[in-house]
Amino acid sequence: MLTGEMKMSNEKSNSSDNTTRCPFCREEIHPEALKCRWCGEMLDGQLARFADNLHTPLPGGMMISVVIPVYNEKNTIREILDAVKAVGLKKEIILVDDYSTDGTREVLQELDEDGVRVFFHEVNKGKGAALRTGFEQVKGDIVIIQDADLEYNPREYFRLVRPILEGKADVVYGSRFIGESHRVLFFWHSLGNRFLTLLSNMFTDLNLTDMETCYKVFRAELLQDITIKSKRFGVEPELTAKFAKKHCRIYEIPISYSGRDYTEGKKIGWKDGFSAIWNIIKFRFVD
């Protein structure tokens, strides 16, 4: 079981300089705030008084495995790695470079940091293949998929893992479409995401709002019965279909989203949309 008894902490959320900080994500907040503007957690309830147990260590000595597939993210890889490391949860970070050609590979080759492991593909295989490589190296109890760009905020790990820690969920999806702030970008991309989610729901009998989200968080033990076959972005509907077939308890949590456009390095295109449709249908009937 992943649940554990939470111990009450009498620590104040103020640092030594009297700055008021969120007990969950440790970001600076207004002294009278009722909700953290960074991680979205409520600050006036009982759970906030138990936040240090969620912060570090995790119940029962648990560990998070953050798997980051990487391809041509030289401009963001260092920043996203620092952001993940800054999250106050016991974790390992698994980076898989999918044969980057923009200098990212060289940046990763120079990494020598505790809790960070890097693996390299000798040819470009795709996001799904990179995740498969990363999943094979997982040693933690809960897996978080993190993109190597800056679209998704690691400060939200706390709210994403909570339903699993509380024993309510096996899988948690971070949804970009249920109420949090987001950068305004492409109408057709948004419409495409909603269409693919609707189609996926029809074949899985789920009621997700964001099947294509990067933030998929799940119990590591689920990987014992799941083998990723998709090489590219088809991994999103594939994982969803396989979670549904296993009758996993799935929660959705609202997340913020700072999307980017193609001039900033966005890679997914219309061909991946058609591939997603095929994979939604395919993995309804095959494993």
Image (cartoon, rainbow, N blue to C red):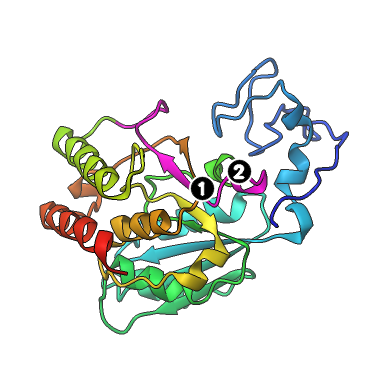
Q: Is residue 128 magenta?
A: no
- Residue range corresponding to the magenta coloring: 163-183
Cα separation, mark 1 vs mark 2, equals 7 Å
Q: Position of residue 37 (x, y in %)?
A: 54, 26
Residue closest to the eye, 193 or 256:
193
Label 1 sits on residue: 249
Task: Please indicate, yes or no, whether residue 263 appears anywhere in the rendered image.
Answer: yes
Residue closest to the eye, 128 or 79:
128
Left or right: 246 as drawn, with respect to 28: left
The numbered mark, 1 or 2, whose residue comes first in the sequence reads 2
Label 2 sits on residue: 168
- From the image, which quarter does the N terminus lie in? bottom right
Residue closest to the eye, 177 or 20:
177
Question: Element type at marker 2?
Answer: loop
> Disc 1, disc 2: CB below 8 Å?
yes
Task: Please indicate, yes or no, whether residue 233 appears anywhere in the rendered image.
Answer: no
Disc 2 residue type (three-letter): Lys
Left or right: 28 as drawn, with respect to 45: left
Left or right: 45 as drawn, with respect to 226: right
Q: Position of residue 160 (x, y in %)?
A: 54, 44
Q: What residue do we see at 65% from left, 46% from top?
A: 167
Tell me which corner region of the image, top left, top right, bottom left or bottom right, holds residue 2: bottom right
- From the image, which quarter does the C terminus lie in? bottom left
Q: Please identify the dominant SS of the magenta region.
A: loop
Q: Is residue 182 magenta?
A: yes
Left or right: 137 as drawn, with respect to 229: right
Disc 1 residue type (three-letter): Arg
